[in-house]
Image: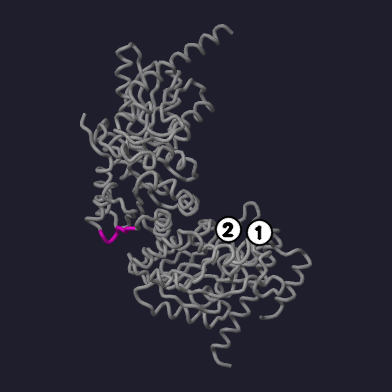
Amino acid sequence: MKNVAQRAYFGKALAELGDRNKDIVVLDADLGGSTKTSDFAKVHPERFFQCGIAEQNMMGTAAGLAVSGKKVFASTFAVFATGRCWDQIRQSIAYPDLDVKIVATHCGISVGGDGASHQALEDVSLMRSLPNMTVICPADANEAYKATMAMAEHSGPCYMRMGRADFPMITGEDDEFTIGKATVLKKGKDVTLVGSGQMVSVCLEAAEILKDDGVSAEVINMSTVKPLDADTLLESAERTRCVVTAEEHSIIGGLGSAVAECLSENGNQPLVRVGVRDSFGESGDPDELMIKYGLTKEDIVFAARKAIDRKRKKKGFLWRK
Amino acid sequence: MPNEEVEFDFLKERARIIRRHVIDMTCAAGSGHPGGSLSATDILCTLYFKVMKHDPKAPQWKQRDRFVLSKGHVAPALYAVLAESGYFPVKELDTLRELGSRLQGHPSYGKLPGIEMSTGSLGQGISIANGMALAAKLDSADNRIYCLCGDGELQSGQNWEAAMLAAHYDLDNLVVFVDRNRLQTMGDTEDVLSLEPLADKWSAFGWNVIEIDGHDFAAIIKACEDAKRCRGRPTVVIANTVKGRGVSFMENNPDFHGKCCNPEQKEKAMCELEECL
């Protein structure tokens, strides 16, 4: 499996979209070289607007363009694309339900050396709580490409988050991607592993370890965190009867919370969340950080065992009754 | 009588009707922001009844000039102007702030014809207007973008981000009016967080600056014409106004920023607004 940066495919998709659709406009806050919106700027400079290090104005400008009929992509690092301008997104984009696609790169702890100030671990939570907002966390570069194309066809506000590093390519070029639809990457019967973003590939690795131990794990790629594909989740959870979520994000407000909300209102299967446990990150090598903050395949395996254990205890309790 | 005077009489009469609506609506709702609505009334009337190219029968007409009410809390004045223009029935003004009404406490996009953007969280309007002005440039359209800001909201940093961008992209199709009534919730703007020298700030940001009496119709019209002639730069019109203008006991009184009249006050206000200023 080769490792590829999601943002490279995002930039490529954006440039292609620009050729096809003259209404596509891209806004940058002085990070286009990193987010790869520079790929669009190279071929469509007249529709690329540099807004400088001023994200609040960038979001408002995006809204003004969108309300005038443009399809706007506004891009910067996840920290600055969400928390820095949350009220602007709320008031000027989500509330009027405008066609603005906020695309963030450098999410999560794998940003590495830059440290906590640049490691967005709350962005999904911030965006998920906004009415009208769709939240997409593509699992790899192929999905980043397809999600970009899908957003161009979608009407209304979207938030897409991508990492900085090169991640394993786990989906094929021809695999289907639909906003709001989860995909089952591996069938299993003992536990459901639900991943988002780069943690989907880690879930697949964890499933291999579990398989060696005789545990059959189902792996779901929940690439749209909002709206959550409850049908796919509940269908799986009803069969396996326990669930693990894995995300490179705080366990508060992100995928783990979304799945917990869905399960507690519908199925009540035991759930264990893998994610950053209510703390800021720090500087370090991405791999070291993933270990320190509990985001490895071993952490998912441990969580799966815990979930299965709780399922068994629950069954015993019911039996004793 | 020369044509101009007839025109000003028409605007004066319109402004008087709008001011009466503002008092009526906020009293019926039991809340709202009459003070700022009254200071902005003459600017709004001049824009909608004289300056702007728009068609109430076709609110989505592509070539229309656009208006963003950055100071969203003066929605009563905007609603009254839109209704009197023919965007929706005047009778609907009575529903301000009611459950299910299209006349939300602050403007809400997509509900009421003529509302170009949701506003209310202050400091965001110029950015929206920037986006509209960029879109017009991209489309080589000759429509113009107008934005009305409060003076107090200029304390918010986003305005100055927006001011930089508008100048950087030479948005000469953009005109920002500042309703300089010098009062905000907690008192005089210069005591709360001083804005002066305000004109110098805008000049330093690269804008064409025009200062006028914001209750002088001729001056408002002339400012818009001068802005049109100014190439390569956005224009800001610092319109010196009186908060609560038109009702003696509301004028320059910060108490009426976010509070409506009681029944006796209402009677007195409506009485004063029987005749043109």
Q: Circle 1 — which element?
A: helix
Image quarter in which the N terminus of chain A is found:
top left
Is B120 on the left or on the right of A203, as rendered?
right
Q: Nearer the viewer, residue B160 or B120?
A: B160
Asked whether residue A57 appears in the rendered view, the answer is: yes
Residue A276, compared with residue B139, is above or below; it is above
Residue B138, compared with residue A132, is above or below; it is below
Residue B72, position as x, y percentages in the image: 55, 61
Single out the residue that lies furthest toward the right: B264
Q: Circle 2 — which element?
A: loop
> To which residue does mark 2 refer?
B106
Is label 1 on the same chain as label 2?
Answer: yes
Residue A48 on the magenta segment: yes
Magenta-colored span: A45-50
Chain letter of disc 2 in the image? B
Given the image, on which type of amino acid does mark 1 rest? Thr
Residue A71, position as x, y percentages in the image: 36, 54
Callout 2 crowding tier (Cα within 10 Å): few <14, some 14–19, many ≥20? many
> To which residue does mark 1 refer?
B95
Q: Nearer the viewer, residue A296 or A67?
A: A296
- Location of residue A280 (image quadrant): top left
Q: How many marks?
A: 2
Image quarter in which the C terminus of chain A is found:
top right
Chain letter of disc 1 in the image? B
- Location of residue A8 (image quadrant): top left
In this view, the mark in front (1 or 2): 2
Given the image, on which type of amino acid does mark 2 rest? His
